[in-house]
Image: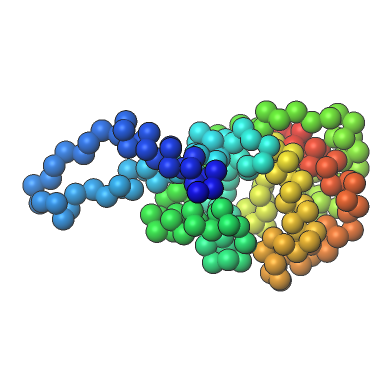
Amino acid sequence: MSTIRRLAVVVLAGFAIVLPAAPARAQGPASAPGPFDSPLAKVITCAACHGVNGNSRSDAMPIIAGMDAAYFKKQVQAYAGGARPSPEMGPYSKQILDIGVDEVAAFFAGQRMEPTPVKVDPAAVERGRVAAAACVACHGPAGKADPAKRTPALAGQAPGYLRDQIRLFKQDARNPGEAALAAVKAVMKTVPDERIPDIAAYYSSLR
C-alpha cells in the first residue's frame, strides 16, 4: 500500500470514529445516508495529501484551496481518464467523480488559500523574476489564476511542486500530446534546466 493510500485510510478511519451516527429514517435502510453524503466526507480523503481545507504545507503537494472550480474539475477528469498520468491521483480522481466532483470542486473553491510556508532563497527569487518573463503571457505578472484561460494560480504554491510541474511540461509528461498545452510546453522547452528552480522560487514567493 502506497504512503498516500495509507494516509487516506488513516484519515478516513479517524473521520469514521468522530462522525456522529445519522438518525434512523422511517423509510427504512434503503433511504439511509451513504458514507459520502456529508460534504465533509466528500473532501476528507483529499486532506490526507492536500492539507486541511486544501492548504497543503508540503513542498511536494499543491495547494488546492481557492482553486477555480472549473479548473479543478478539468484536472480531476484528466487524472481519471489518464490524460494527466499519475499513479497516485488516478484512483482518487475516479472516486471524486463517483461521489460528486462539482460539490468537491465548489468546496475547495470556497476555501481561503494560505500560501506555502516553505521558504525560498531570495537570490533564486531574483533570478526567477527575470527568467519568468516568458510565463507572464499566461499567468500574469502576479502569478494569479485566470479562469477565462483556465490557468491556475502559481503565487504562493510550494516551490517543489512548481519545479516538478515545470519539468513535466518541458518533458511533455503532463497531459502528453494535449494540443491546448502545446504553446505552454514550447515555452517551457526554452527554459534552461538550471533556471527552473529559480522560476519556481519566484512564483512561490509571490503573495
Relative side of 91 to 206, left or right = left
Percent x, y of residue 161: 70, 44
Residue at 63%, 42% in the rendered image: 61
> Where residue 91 sits: x, y (%)?
49, 57
In percent of the image, x 16 and y 38: which residue is there?
23
- Closest to the observer: 149 or 204? 204
Of 56 and 184, nearer the camera is 56
**Colour setup of the view:** rainbow
Q: Is residue 152 left or right of residue 203?
A: left
**Furthest residue to the front?**
1
Question: Within the image, what quadrant is residue 65 found in?
Answer: top right
The residue under the point 88% across, 51% down is: 193
One can see residue 189 in this view: yes
Q: How many marks?
A: 0
Compared with 184, 203 (above or below) is above
Can residue 76 be seen?
A: no
Pinpoint residue 31: horizontal percent, then vertical percent. 17, 53
Q: Position of residue 22 (x, y in %)?
A: 21, 39
Q: Quadrant of the C terminus?
A: top right
Above or below for 95 versus 38: below
Q: Does residue 170 appear left or right of residue 102 in this picture?
A: right
